[in-house]
Image (cartoon, helix red, strand yellow):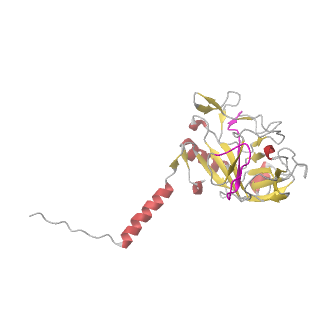
Amino acid sequence: MVARTAFRRPTISTLVIVLGSLAVGSLAVPTASATPRFHVECPFHHFNRDDPIVYPRERGKSHRHTYFGNRSTDAFSTYRSLRRAGTNCGKRADKAAYWMPAVYKNGRRVKPNDGDFYYRGRTAPLRAIRAFPKGLKIIAGNSEATRPQSTKIVGWSCFGSEGTARPRMRDCGKADVKVLIHFPSCWDGKRKDSGNHKSHMHYSIRKNGRHVCPKSHPVPVPELSFSIRLPFHNGRHVKLSSGPFYTMHADFWNAWNQRSLRRLVDKCLHAGIECPSFEA
């Protein structure tokens, strides 16, 4: 006669512990990503008519800008002043200054709803990607454009849509308009700025099916992308402080805590994963 094995019905407390462990485990594990990345949320902070990259120490010289991240950015900003100032980014180590032209709808200046800043591993090999050097300045996009720019640089989409960037704004129905601005991911390895604030950087090129850096700019760095959600649903009666919608551009001044930035590049980009936002 075969002895019966006693069966114990799991208690509610046991189930709670098991399910809780599974939930925590799933949150803690980074996800594999076709494009490794980490991202930081930095909401809108202030407007002014300064541009510390193009017009340093010349207050009010520029068209009006919309600022995210560093709380102090103005015409008199320096790397040291940015490092000393506070930030409204979700990650305190990120004291970088992010800005773009002010946006107007029906003649009224608007405040962005959200600001998300993505750092992606675009170039191969991933292990070669280096953190931005401290104090690096970059401008992406053309403030003097006379026609829509390539979506590889500036794209317009709708909040909640993925992979739908277009050269022009479209009707998003009930969803908000979203603008995407992509920065170059190859550095010349020497200069932290240049005369036009662009030539020390270069966009990656495709070679044998991979994104690589050209010989003129051999140092791969993260591909920074702005993803800015705007509080309107279509492009009708929309202008920028720099001109028509197709003059969209953006500026970045690296004032991260370098140790934290290097750690994220290694943990996320070198590892080929998308890190959860709470780890960024």
Q: Is residue 23 left or right of residue 145?
A: left
Count up the numbered dots. Answer: 0
- Whether residue 128 is visible to the viewer of this picture, yes or no, is yes
Q: Residue at x 83, y 51 (%)?
A: 239
Q: Can you tell which quarter of the image residue 150 is in? A: top right
Image spot of residue 265 (x, y percent)? 60, 45
| Depicted 12 relative to depicted 247: above or below | below
Q: Residue at x 66, y 54 (%)?
A: 159
Query: Looking at the image, which is closer to me, 211 or 258?
Result: 211
Q: Is residue 100 left or right of residue 11?
A: right
Q: Residue at x 78, y 54 (%)?
A: 67
Image spot of residue 25 (x, y percent)? 46, 58
Q: Quadrant of the N terminus?
A: bottom left
| Depicted 71 relative to depicted 251: above or below | below
- Farthest residue, direction bottom: 12
The magenta stretch spans residue 175: yes
Q: Which residues are magenta?
A: 164-188
| Depicted 191 relative to depicted 4: above or below | above
Query: Looking at the image, which is closer to me, 201 or 176?
Result: 176
- Whether residue 86 is visible to the viewer of this picture, yes or no, is no
- Farthest residue, direction left: 1
The magenta stretch spans residue 122: no
Q: Can you tell which quarter of the image residue 20 is in? A: bottom left
Give the main secondary structure of the magenta stretch.
loop
Image spot of residue 77 (x, y percent)? 82, 51
Q: Is residue 41 left or right of residue 195?
A: left
Image spot of residue 139 (x, y percent)? 77, 42
Q: Residue at x 82, y 42 (%)?
A: 143
